[in-house]
Image: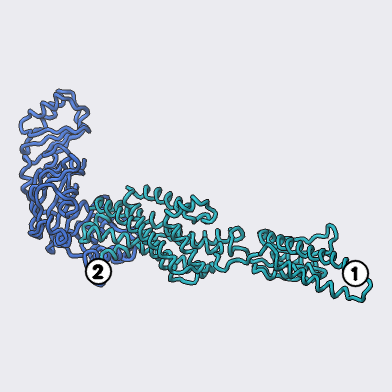
Amino acid sequence: MLTLLNVKKSFDSREVVKGVSLQVEKGESFGLLGPNGAGKSTLISMICGLVPFETGDIWIDGKLVSKNLKEIKQMIGVVPQDIALYPTMSALDNLVFWGRMYGLSGKDARSRAKEILEIVGLTERAKGRIETFSGGMKRRINIGAALMHRPKLLIMDEPTVGIDPQSRNHILETVKSLNEKGMTVIYTSHYMEEVEYLCKRIAIIDDGKLIASGTKKDLNNRLAGGTVLKLTVDSLHPLFIEQLKKLHGVEKVIVQPTYEIDIHLHSKMEIVAGVILLASQQGVHIQSMQLQEANLETLFLQLTGRSLRE
Amino acid sequence: MKSLLIAVKDAKIHLKDRKAILMMILMPILLTLILGSALKGVMGGGSMPETILGVYSPESNLMTKSIMKSLGENGLTITIEHAESEKQLMDWMEERAVHVGLLFPDGWGSGVEGNRAVIIPISGQETGATVIRRMIETVAQMSQAIENSTATVMAEAATLAAEDDINLEEIQNELTASIEQIVNEQRAYVIEPPKEESVSSMQYYAAAMAAMFLLFNAMAGGKSFHQERRSETLSRLMMTPASVRSILTGKFIGSFLFAWIQFLIFLGATRLLLKVDWGPSILQILFITFFYIFSVAGLAMVVAAFTTNEKMADVIGSMGVQVLALLGGSMLPLSLFPEIMRKIAMATPNSWALTSFISIMEGAPWSTLWLPAAVLLGIGVTAIFISSLRLGRRIA
């Protein structure tokens, strides 16, 4: 459905997308995971034809984006990160307007808008002005507007930012259901639990580069053993850190400025006693200690040394 | 088609904005009412207020008859009401049933020293009172001159006629009539009745406010573009199959459409509520409005292209509208401007619209409208050309 081949983009002299290549199959739900500023939104803008890219190529359904832009736009539905709706217009009027912009007739747009309102669970608020809606309700209409023209590919850019858990669940269920009905979905977020829940395949992007991609299982396998021992200490004694790295079974030690130390282990090994001994020798007080199973967050941490939500 | 969808959407959004309605539709109607009423007595032409003159004269002589005749005949909007007594006249004044009171004392016009007519205006009717006082002075001087001439000639005639049986009274009457006729034929002054085509203050300010408040669409249109950008709806529009040209055309037509709605409501309200006469040809008014709104919608695109955000569009737009309104005669009548300012005013689109509206109200022929229409069209086309180059680059 979607193929990106060595796509690069710079703003002024800063390279924001650094040769990204990836492929999304028809009917797949694909997650694009990365912290804020990683280049996810720029990548989406390039897929939609909004931002031109310098090198590489993008194909959607076998068609080059750069040469078939109008056709491509008709094929994709984009849910932008911001609420891109007209606040003084009603939910119904907004949906009808966006439907008509994609070429639906007045009658078709109205009937489709009613369907969409049912999908997003806001039929009763059809005539309410968007400005009177809660954040979650606005997000649901924001998604609805992208579905009006029955796109083949739905691209969602952080669709759940700043909303209540109930609306988030509703949105996740809606996206899951759409995907189950055959719609190809690209879901970008920095909430790894959402991506883990919705997507079968995931790509992790950071600083404009694709640093890992594959199924959840593939990615977990990439984690060295997949276990992390998290410590909170009262001081970051350099000798203590150095000796931690030399402990048997430790692959990597990441020190956070908040007096937190993540010790990545090759396997679930018993190193707790050794860590406590080292700390007491160096006069470091351990305030908390937690053994964490591997997930995308720990993978991201392991790959970049930074948290997804930084 | 997509342009039209964007235009209709923009017009709907404007119409749902209460602040915009208040500012763009109610405000000009209110200002027309206030300025048109306040400056009714100050402006020239047809703005001479309609005055009800209450008169009490205990006796009717040649001079009072001449004055009443002059006041009634000179095409001025003076209605004369005769009071039975001085008290009745004062009562009328008290009740404001008359605007100006004219009280002739006993024996007025007989040359008695200090025997003067009294003119009393009620508050706000000083202009009418001044006009009446000047007319009375003129007529009184003329009548006095006739009477003096007749008296001199009659004194001579009486000496000559002492021996013969001549009817002196008959000669005096004939002589007075002849002198009066000569004086009337040869008098150096003429009291001009107001020209029929001259506009009233209410008409002027209706045209001026229409020109000024339609100009606010330039600011509103520019702001609307930045609102779309800020709220990301512009990006979303760009993700649809609509081209950049369709989007820009839609924004232009949106400003154009709302300005028409604004003008038609204003036109209807001023005609029905304020009884403003927009002249003999409403078609001419709509013709000039079309070109004026075209130029204003073009200026909206210029505001959008040369400002970077809503706040900047607001500040620059407001300043621009006020300067143009001042220069273009929307605040003070162009007739009060010195020659150089009138020439500068020709650079403003609202001045062309305003002067055209006034000409139409005065019954101007179609041929006088070609030039303003061409100028307004030129402003609009230039504005669209400049702004579309810049906007096209910015949003693509």
| Mark 2, other Cα within 10 Å: few <14 / some 14–19 / many ≥20 | many
What kind of residue is marked 2?
A: Ala
Q: Quadrant of residue B263?
A: bottom left
Of residue B108 and residue B168, the one placed in the foreground of this image is B168
Q: What percent of the width, then of the height, locates residue A14?
A: 18, 40
Colour used to depict chain A in the structure image: blue
Q: Is residue B5 above or below residue A213?
A: below
Q: Is residue A217 visible?
A: yes
Q: Is residue A117 visible?
A: no
Colour used to depict chain B in the structure image: cyan
Residue at (9, 33) in percent of width and height: A271
Quadrant that contains the N terminus of chain A? bottom left
What kind of residue is marked 1?
A: Leu
A298 on left or right of B158: left
Q: Are marks 2 and 1 in contact (CB under 8 Å)?
A: no
Residue corresponding to mark 1: B160
Q: What percent of the width, then of the height, locates residue B181?
A: 74, 70
Q: How is the image coloured?
A: by chain
Q: CA distance from mark 2 to mark 1?
A: 110 Å
Residue corresponding to mark 2: A109
Element type at mark 1: helix
Quadrant that contains the C terminus of chain A? top left
Residue farthest along the right direction in this orientation: B163
Of residue B188 and residue A200, the one placed in the foreground of this image is B188
Element type at mark 2: helix
Of residue A308 and residue A227, the one placed in the foreground of this image is A308
Residue at (22, 33) in percent of width and height: A258
Q: Quadrant of residue B88?
A: bottom right
| Chain ID, mark 2 | A
Q: What percent of the width, then of the height, locates residue B395?
A: 25, 52
Q: Are marks 2 and 1 on the same chain?
A: no
| Chain ID, mark 1 | B
